[in-house]
Image (cartoon, helix red, strand yellow):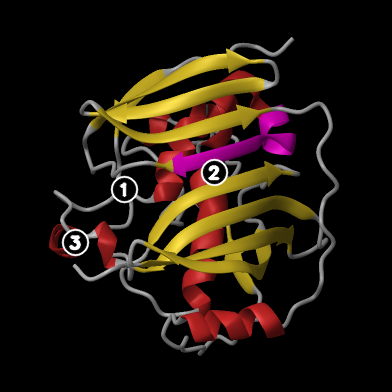
């Protein structure tokens, strides 16, 4: 029987106020009607997954599954609470801040992982790549012809090295700030690889991460180089926004073994401010 994953509380942390995606800055977020810079969706996801890491440790890092949906903004430094409800293979969770439901999640730890995808060997993005504007036409081309792959390195210097302002609040397995931690990659970084890859193939500003389904296949140790292979799955418009559904497979660069699969939904073109 699974150990219970307990709810918890903390204060939100926007790690990337200087991001190229200016929705994480006060000026652009306010221009679109928000009260301040948006905390990244991958950071919100990491907060909802936090109880799984605390309760299940390496088992979670090796085969955990999460489905996270962002409902409304989480703002930097705002207090939040994650409320959990136990289910057979995991828990349901809600993240609430200042009386607003910001995100919901279904988190599970299946006994057996789904089969891991195989490495395709997609051509890599060149170092000097200048992505074209994010248009429906450009993403349609990527869907038909395939996307270039991208490379990422898990390190203590990465902006997603912690998803909390005080890194000592992060579970020991994920801490990179001290020898006491094991330094394994957290969900904000792994889901962030999908974000960075998405933003590398097309220029968009601003854009919003909305939803992910993710499957862990192996822990990612400090210093690991990862290769991401991307597939454009669907494109559609709704209420003036343009959406893209994409899948990302993350592999160790040395062995080409899959460590994570991320299915992501994002708004790549927002309706006018």
The vertical placement of 256 against 168, above or below, is below
Question: Distance between the Cα atoms at labels 1 and 3?
Answer: 15 Å
Q: Which residue is mark 2?
A: 187
The residue depicted at 70 percent of the width and 43 percent of the height is: 216
The residue depicted at 15 percent of the width and 56 percent of the height is: 33
Q: Secondary structure at mark 1?
A: loop
Q: Secondary structure at mark 3?
A: loop
What percent of the width, then of the height, locates residue 269?
A: 37, 71
User: Is 30 or 175 nearer to us in this picture?
Assistant: 30
Counting other residues with Cα less than 10 Å from the Cα at mark 1, is it few (<14), some (14-19), or many (20 or more)?
Answer: many
The residue depicted at 51 percent of the width and 57 percent of the height is: 265
Q: Which residue is mark 3?
A: 32
What percent of the width, then of the height, locates residue 229?
A: 69, 68
The residue depicted at 23 percent of the width and 26 percent of the height is: 99
The vertical placement of 221 against 180, above or below, is below
Left or right position of 17 against 249: left
Residue range of the region highlighted in magenta in the rendering? 58-69
Q: Earlier in the sequence, mark 1 or mark 2?
A: 1
Q: Are marks 1 and 3 in contact (CB under 8 Å)?
A: no
Question: Distance between the Cα atoms at labels 2 and 3?
Answer: 27 Å
Q: Which residue is mark 1?
A: 39
- Quadrant the N terminus occupies: top right
Tell which tag, 2 or 3, sits nearer the viewer. 3
The image quadrant that residue 187 belongs to is: top right
Can residue 109 be seen here? The reply is yes
What percent of the width, then of the height, locates residue 71?
A: 37, 41
What percent of the width, then of the height, locates residue 6?
A: 50, 14
Can residue 147 be seen here? The reply is no
The image quadrant that residue 257 belongs to is: bottom right
């Amino acid at each position: 029987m699974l150990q219970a994953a307990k709810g918890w509380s903390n204060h939100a942390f926007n790690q990337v106020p200087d991001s190229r995606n200016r929705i994480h800055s006060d000026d652009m977020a306010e221009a679109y009607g928000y009260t301040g810079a948006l905390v990244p969706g991958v950071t919100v996801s990491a907060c909802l997954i936090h109880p799984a890491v605390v309760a299940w440790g390496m088992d979670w890092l090796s085969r955990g599954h999460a489905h996270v949906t962002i409902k409304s903004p989480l703002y930097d430094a705002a207090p939040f609470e994650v409320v959990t409800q136990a289910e057979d293979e995991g828990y349901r969770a809600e993240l609430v801040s200042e009386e607003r439901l910001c995100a919901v999640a279904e988190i599970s730890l299946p006994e057996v992982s789904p089969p891991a995808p195989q490495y395709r060997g997609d051509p890599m993005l060149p170092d000097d790549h200048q992505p074209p504007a994010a248009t429906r036409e450009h993403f349609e081309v990527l869907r038909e012809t395939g996307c270039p792959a991208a490379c990422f390195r898990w390190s203590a210097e990465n902006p997603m090295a912690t998803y909390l302002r005080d890194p000592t609040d992060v579970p020991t397995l994920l801490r990179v700030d001290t020898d006491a931690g094991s330094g394994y990659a957290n969900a904000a970084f792994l889901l962030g690889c999908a974000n960075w890859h998405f933003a590398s193939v097309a220029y968009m500003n601003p854009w919003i991460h909305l939803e992910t389904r993710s499957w862990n296949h192996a822990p990612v140790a400090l210093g690991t180089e990862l290769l991401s292979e991307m597939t454009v799955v669907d494109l559609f418009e709704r209420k003036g926004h343009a959406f893209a559904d994409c899948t990302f497979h993350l592999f160790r660069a040395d062995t080409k073994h899959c460590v994570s699969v991320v299915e992501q939904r994002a708004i790549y073109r927002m309706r006018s401010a």
